[in-house]
Image (cartoon, rainbow, N blue to C red):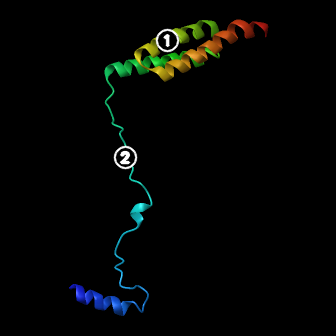
Amino acid sequence: MDREDRMQQASTKSDSGTAGHDYREETAAELSAPAYTNRREEPVSEDGMVSRFYGWASLFLAVLSLFFLPVLLGASAIVLGLIARGKGAGTTGAWAIGIGAVSLILGLFVFPFF
């Protein structure tokens, strides 16, 4: 189809309200931006497994210290939490240190009065 034929069709379509425009474009692409991620799955090394173990073990001791032997288990949870943070398990080690400290403080200063 050449340009003259298009112009004729445009003049005949102007009565229907389309005015000769070609409406074959896709408009849904502007509704959302493409999702890009920079996240890569890295295999867990043996050092990562060891740090995870220290982190979860210290967190387990910290929670257990809230119920049994708060001074002994709270102090050991704090020490093991410091080791876990040094090995790379920062979040679980920090939680273990915090919970162990709360348990230790409760065991030394609050529980003796009850």
Q: Taking 80 as reference, is 41 above or below it?
A: below
Q: Taking 26 as reference, is 110 above or below it?
A: above
Q: Is residue 68 visible?
A: no
Identify which residue is drawn at 38% across, 18% down: 50
Q: Position of residue 94 (x, y in %)?
A: 53, 19
Specify few, some or many for label 2: CA neighbours under 10 Å numbering under 14, 14-19, or 20 or more.
few
**In 3D space, how far apart are the residues under numbered discs 2 and 1 (Cα atoms)?**
37 Å
Identify which residue is drawn at 61% across, 14% down: 65
The residue to which callout 1 is attached is 82
Q: Position of residue 88 (x, y in %)?
A: 41, 19
Query: What amino acid type is highlighted by mark number 2?
Result: Tyr
Question: Which of labels 2 and 1 is toward the front?
Answer: 2
Q: Taking 113 as reference, is 55 above or below it?
A: below
Question: Which residue reaches farthest left?
Answer: 2
The residue to which callout 2 is attached is 36
The image quarter in which residue 87 lies: top left
Query: What amino acid type is highlighted by mark number 1?
Result: Leu
Q: Secondary structure at mark 1?
A: helix
In which quadrant is the C terminus drawn? Answer: top right
The foreground one among 54 and 41 is 41
Q: Position of residue 29 (x, y in %)?
A: 39, 62
The foreground one among 8 and 113 is 8
Q: Secondary structure at mark 2?
A: loop
Q: Is residue 95 visible?
A: yes
**Dots 2, 1 in contact, CB < 8 A:** no
Specify few, some or many for label 1: CA neighbours under 10 Å numbering under 14, 14-19, or 20 or more.
many
Q: Earlier in the sequence, mark 2 or mark 1?
A: 2
Q: Is residue 114 left or right of residue 65?
A: right
